Amino acid sequence: MILTDFDYARAASLEEALTLLAGTDGARVLAGGQSLLPGLRTGAEKARLLIDVRHLAQLRGVGQDGGELRIGALTTLAELAADPLVRAGAPELAAAARANGDPQVRNLGTVGGNLAATERPTDLPVAAIAAGARAELAGPGGTRTAPAEELAASGVPAGEVLTALLVPAAGAAAAFEKTADRATRYPVCAAAVRITPDGPRIAVTGATPRALRLRGVEDRLRGGPYTTTAVLAAFRAEPRELFVPGRGTSAEYLGHLAGVLTARALARAAAHSSA
């Protein structure tokens, strides 16, 4: 299919992008375009104006302030996967970026675009939730932050621009696992974990309606052990309606798969934390 008609503007600054968003109903922000442009071709997405922010240097790059990483929204998935600060402090995010698509997608796709895509499961949101990350959003009222779980539920609010992801740097006690659809590379199921002094943080996507933190599973595993048997038992106690059947899979299968991937991720995270 071909793209529908829309206007195009290249924003010279974040402030100009916000002004254009506020002044046009149906305006959309264009970053890597790996989700938005295919959606426009198929009709799944609509836009009257595309606001190109790809050249705004202030939205790119990774830095560290104390115990927190600041990852610019225009940082590509390839840059995220290779960044030494991310690999050391938030390995679940680096692994999720490496698992995303193919090299062409990772070289163009951005952190912000992957986090903002709510129409299909993507890899970064589940890792961001497990990491306890916050999204930094700029809008008419200034800059604010929101939990990554909130962003996964509702997307970027109209009139705002996702500018960065703020991630606690927790070291190596984190991991990501994924079973991908062979045709699209989207996750059939993906799980991300981070082991903290208060217990594990566990999030799942693909098998669930959206990227979700599984607090019930966390509570059942608090204090350990993180054996496969214990993890699968914790997942069996979750309501089956939490898992959404599709693509020839049942809720029972997806619940089991989510447990298997979580057990693998917890085993790797625990091994790294004790190394």
Image (cartoon, rainbow, N blue to C red):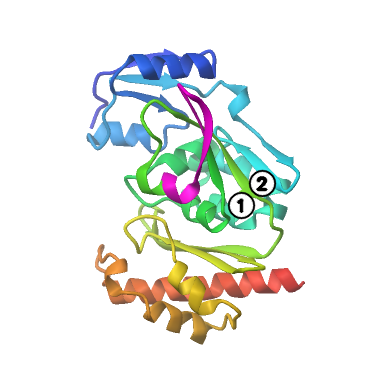
* Part of the protein shown in magenta: 137-151
Q: Name the residue under label 1.
A: 94
Residue 48, located in which quarter of the rendered image? top left
Q: Which residue is at 65% across, 39% downward?
A: 70
Kindly give the residue lying farthest to the front in the view shown: 141
Horizontal and vertical percent position of residue 91: 64, 56
Q: Given the image, on which type of amino acid does mark 1 rest? A: Ala
Q: Which residue is at 46% across, 18% downward?
A: 17
Residue 86, compared with residue 259, is above or below; it is above
Q: Name the residue under label 2.
A: 82
Instruction: Measure the alpha-carbon separation of dots 2 and 1.
Output: 7 Å
Horizontal and vertical percent position of residue 199: 60, 70
Q: Quick check: can you spot residue 154?
A: yes
Residue 18, compared with residue 203, is above or below; it is above
Mark before the other along the chain sequence, 2 or 1: 2
* Contact check, label 2 and label 1, Cβ < 8 Å: yes
Residue 106, compared with residue 183, is above or below; it is above
Quadrant for the N terminus, please.
Answer: top left
- Give the left or right position of residue 177, taking residue 159 as reference: right
Q: Given the image, on which type of amino acid does mark 2 rest? A: Ala
| Magenta-colored segment: predominant secondary structure | strand
Horizontal and vertical percent position of residue 42: 24, 36
Quadrant for the C terminus, please.
Answer: bottom right
Residue 190, located in which quarter of the rendered image? bottom left
Q: Nearer the viewer, residue 3 or 212?
A: 212
